Each structure stands twice: as structure tokens, then as C-alpha cells.
Amino acid sequence: MSTPESRKRRSPLLDRPGAVEAGADGGGLDAGVAWHYGDPVREQRLLEQGLAVVDLSHRSVVRVSGPDRLRWLDSLTSQRLLDLPPRTSVESLLLSPEGRVEHALHVVDDGEATWLVLEPGEGAPAAAWLDSMRFMLRVDVADVTDEWAVLGEPVGRESLPGEPLAWVDPWPRTSPSSTRYGPSDDEHPGADRPWRELLVPRGELVAAVGDRPLAGTWASEALRVAAWRPRLGAETDERTIPHEVDWLRTGVHLSKGCYRGQETVAKVHNLGRPPRRLVVLHLDGSGAALPPPGAEVIDVERGRAVGHLTSSVRHHELGPVALALVKRTTPVDARLVVDGVAAAQEVVVDPDVAPAHARPQVAAPRRPTV
């Protein structure tokens, strides 16, 4: 979640003509960068065509150096990093001891240091916790958000030597060492969304954009929601485990060594029954306003709340669409309403995932986790 400190940093790209700041009132995850530049529908289309770039300079950046860095990060996070080659992107999660998602790490190594891109305001607390876990290992952790900025672009290629280092989003390609709770990779709507995040010196941000068209976070968020891509601080709360939002497919290695939260990951995976599940809600578009994140999702026939909205956007083709977390037991054909707006449910995480005997088994840790 964004912090007051992260909201003080205002991007110089907000000086571009037509720029409207996201969360200009100080709220929201994307305060400090442009929500749009005057034409959000055109900006979405430019992103889909691979032509535009998105200012993500409000994101946090952490740099981890030292010869033990990959072995150390491997022991602390949910992804296998021990043998990560340079300029190869992976996603990893920092979990609580109870297996709840605390930080989402966009990880890429340049051969000398490992770079972590995080949500706005997450750099300082993540770096502080990591630094507290160094013990006698040869690693150095630094929050370098003041020196480095992030740009998003619709490209699915890893960066080459001589190019700015980039993290390429693996979503929704299920790792051979993991599993999915949603559709197969080739049937997943996220398969049509190439995405990467470039690391550029903050002082060179404007020059790095050059004359490329800019798209705001309205556009990038619309494409993210359409791709069913979970985001920390949006699709997560203090109770979220990775299974509920189908995050195992890219963020968790199911057969690596012990790490904090592994026991919950293994237990829920083997049982196959996460308590909540992510859904897409196609909203009635007759009204002007979108229900805000946090709004209750009501099961009309049962007359009770069954979950809450996590993200809501206007997509240039899908119209008003949202992601929500609902109870696993919510019927897939339930009549739902959010803030008085009718919502048609589309399943993301299957409520009837295969039982343990039909799924690969994952051993719980046999020794205390970090």
C-alpha cells in the first residue's frame, strides 16, 4: 500500500500536456503519476498495439548485492532464485509466517546485483526486513527508489546487454514447478498481455521516454484487470494467501527449500480449498460511476455480503469491469450487486479445484522456517 512518503514524489511526466494525476487527492496506489493524458481509450489501444509507455516512477526499487544474494533471497522468498541467470525475470513473494502475502517482488539479476521492483511505498519496509535477516551472509540491501525509476511497456522480451535492465512479467505462464487455480495458460486472457518494467536512472526518466506516446495508469490498470493479474494492495488484504488469487502459477515454487509461510502454501495446496477466490465482475454500465475498491459484493438471493471489490476500471472493449474476492462457497451463478450495480460473475479461481489425491502433493517444511 502506498505511504505518505511515496505520495510526495511527483513525476516530471505530469508536466506533459493533458496529464491528470492518479489519486490527486492523495489516495490510491498510483498517486504521483498520470492517471491519463486526456484520452484513456486511445491510450489503452496504444498499449495493446505495443506503442505506448507507462510512467511507473512511483514504484519502489530495492537493490541487493553481494556474492550470497541469490542463495539468501532463495531462502526467504517463495520462488527458486538460487540459480537465476542474469537478465532472466521471475516473480517471488514475501509471505508472513502464516503464509499471507506481504510483498510481491519483481526480480531480475544483472550479474552483479539483484533488483526488486515493488509497489509504491513498499521499498523501505521490504528493505528493512530483508536487512534484518542478513546475519553473517555477504549481502547488502539498499532502497534505491530515489535513484531509480520504473517505466512500463507492452513488451514480452527480456532486456539484452547494453539495454536498460528490465523485469518481464511471467503472467500467466504457469511454471513447471508450480500449479494453477485458474484456466490453462493458452486459454487465459492474460496470455495476450505482454508486459515489462524498465529500470532507468531517475534523472534520465524524461529522456528515456523520448517521443514515445504516454499512457496513464487508467490504461495499464484496465489491461491488468482484463488479464486477471493480481496486484499487491489491490487484490490483497491482511488475510490474502497466494492460492486465492491464482498467484501460485507465477509466484511460488512448490518444490524448493523452506521459506517463511511455506507450511500454509503446502497445506492449502494439498487440501485444494482456499477460503476465498478471485472473480471477474462485469458491471452494469448504465450508470456513470464505478463502484470503488472495498465496496461489498452482495449475494442478492441470500441477502448478505460475500466479498469485496478489489479493482474497478473502464476497459475500452469490456466496459466497466472489476476484480473481487468472494467466499469460495459463493455459487458461480449467484446474482451479485455492488453498490447497487448489477454484476455478472466470471470465474477466475475454480471453487471446485481438484482434491488433494488428484493434485501434486507438496511436503510441508520439516524444520523451522526463517
Image (tube, rainbow, N blue to C red):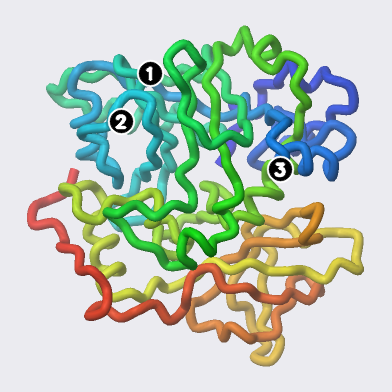
Residue type for callout 3? Glu
Residue 234 lies, with reference to residue 4, above or below; the image says below
Q: Residue at x 81, y 52 (%)?
A: 316
Quadrant where the N terminus lies? top right
Badge 2 marks a residue whose secondary structure is helix
Residue type for callout 2? Leu
Residue type for callout 1? Ala
Residue at label 1? 142
Residue at label 2? 130
Q: Nearer the viewer, mark 3 or mark 2?
A: 3
Residue 244 lies, with reference to residue 59, above or below; the image says below
Of the numbered discs 1 and 2, the one sitting upstream in the chain is 2
Of the numbered discs 1 and 3, the one sitting upstream in the chain is 3
Residue 211 lies, with reference to residue 24, above or below; the image says above
Q: Nearer the viewer, residue 212 or 8?
A: 212
Q: Residue at x 68, y 88 (%)?
A: 303
In the picture as drawn, the residue positioned furthest to the bottom comes out as 301
- Residue 238 placement (x, y as % from top left): 46, 55
Quadrant where the C terminus lies? top left
Q: Are marks 1 and 2 in contact (CB under 8 Å)?
A: no
Of the numbered discs 3 and 2, the one sitting upstream in the chain is 3
Residue 43 in view: yes
